Amino acid sequence: MKVAAADGLSFSIPIDSVSKIIEHFKKSGRVIRPWLGLKMLDLNELIISQLKERDAKFPEVEKGILVPMVTPGSPADRAGFHPGDVVIEFDGKPVQSIKEIVEIMDDRIGKPLNVVVKRANNEVVKLTVIPEEANPDM
């Protein structure tokens, strides 16, 4: 698709995403998305080093996804996630990016997912989160 008012600006949508959306519409007449209630941030070397400078208790990780915020009352809150957790494993698979978490979750609403997080002082915690359907009005 091209944007008429922006010379040379265009974008595309991956066919895999379009196929999933079409499947959802055929099945339920709308797009269904799982929701955990987490803000997430992909970690890289620079971010990790800056976080370690600020807080000596920040976990020893080389990769993972930082959870800076947990929505009160959300599936993640009920599962026991805390701000500052670093997700290192999601549904039994090591993860480095939010994209990987989204791919693993797919459209698994109401199905438990096992998550491993690292907390301050390198405490490793196993959690089980059950995604809910994202509010369709959002």
Image (tube, rainbow, N blue to C red):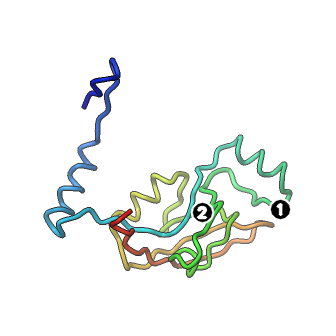
Residue 90: percent from the left, percent from the top? 51, 66
Residue at 52%, 76% (x, y): give it: 74
Residue 45: percent from the left, percent from the top? 69, 42
* Residue under pointer 1: 57
> In which quadrant of the rendered image does the C terminus lie?
bottom left
Say which quarter of the image contains residue 11.
Answer: top left
Residue 87 in the figure: left or right of residue 124:
left
Could you say which is closer to the camera, residue 78 or residue 3?
3
Above-or-below relation of 56 to 135: above
Residue 18 in the figure: left or right of residue 104:
left
What is the number of the mark on residue 79?
Answer: none
Residue at 65%, 60% (x, y): give it: 68
Give the SS element for disc 2: strand
Residue type (three-letter) at the residue carrying disc 2: Val
Say which quarter of the image contains residue 67.
Answer: bottom right
Report crowding for label 1: few under 14, some 14 to 19, many 20 or more residues within 10 A (C-alpha): few
Residue at 16%, 68% (x, y): give it: 27
Residue at 59%, 75% (x, y): give it: 72
Sequence-first tag of 2 and 1: 1
Give the SS element for disc 1: loop
Q: CA distance from mark 2 to mark 1?
A: 16 Å
* Residue under pointer 2: 87
Residue 115: percent from the left, percent from the top? 54, 71
> In which quadrant of the rendered image does the N terminus lie?
top left
Residue type (three-letter) at the residue carrying disc 1: Lys
Residue 110 in the figure: left or right of residue 24:
right
Residue 99 in the figure: left or right of residue 59:
left
